[in-house]
Image: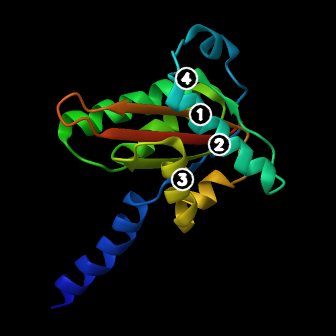
Amino acid sequence: MKQNLLSALLLVPFLWTMNSCSSDASETQPVNTTVQKSVTYSYNTIELETMNLINAHRISVGLNPLEKINYMSVKSEEHNDYMIANNVVNHNDFVARSEDIIKTLGAKTVSENIAFNFNTPQSVLTAWLASPGHKENIEGNFTHFGIAIKENPVTGKKYYTNIFAKI
């Protein structure tokens, strides 16, 4: 009985940690501008429109617009590829993505929004703003962001990964 109770108590913090969608850097590191300049990402129209809508919303509530960083969009695209290949919608490996962004770009904090099966930039933004956690990321204390929106070639459904960082 004690063993089961102890196992259950240890499982709760583990699950809480695994479901978190934000990460803080333990130390501040300078931005590696070489990486930012050397990584290319080709934004499609829907990605650019979604980023513009996010920035318009931030400005409308008195926040700074975010600067796009190609490196974070590449990381977003990698996660979309993972979700499509595994037929899942989740934040798996977010900790690894955020630690990579912290190490590579010197980010202080990193958060992530994902979405699935929205057809327009406005519809995904509306859904994110209706969700307290997603809205918190959109309106968070961030300076930069990256996004990737990719269609599953088999189902035609869109996968969205949007990463935010304070650098």
* Whether label 2 touches label 1, CB < 8 Å: yes
Element under disc 4? helix
At label 2, which amino acid type do we have? Leu
Residue at image point 40% right, 60% down: 19
Q: Which residue is mark 4?
A: 71
Query: If you read the primary sequence from the N terminus, does the residue marked by circle 4 or circle 2 appear first?
Result: 2
Whether the residues at callouts 2 and 3 have beta carbons within 8 Å, the answer is no
Mark closer to the observer (4, 1): 1
Quarter of the image for the N terminus: give it. Answer: bottom left
- Crowd band around label 2 with a 10 angstrom C-alpha radius: few (<14), some (14–19), many (20+): some
What is the CA distance from the residue labelled 4 to the residue labelled 1?
Answer: 19 Å
Residue 49, numbered label: 1
Between 166 and 129, the one lying in front of the other is 129
Residue at mark 2 to residue at mark 1: CA–CA distance: 6 Å
- Image coordinates of residue 70 in percent, x first then y, are 57, 21
What numbered label is drawn on residue 53?
2
Q: Amino acid at mark 4?
A: Tyr
Q: Secondary structure at mark 1?
A: helix
What residue would you read off at disc 3? 22
Of badges 1 and 3, nearer the viewer stands 1
Q: Secondary structure at mark 2?
A: helix
Quarter of the view holding residue 86: top left
In the figure, 124 relative to 27: above or below? below
Residue 102 in sight here: no
Q: As shown in the figure, which amino acid type bears the numbered disc 3?
A: Ser
What residue lies at 36% left-to-right and 43% top-to-bottom?
93
Pointer 1 or 3: first along the chain:
3
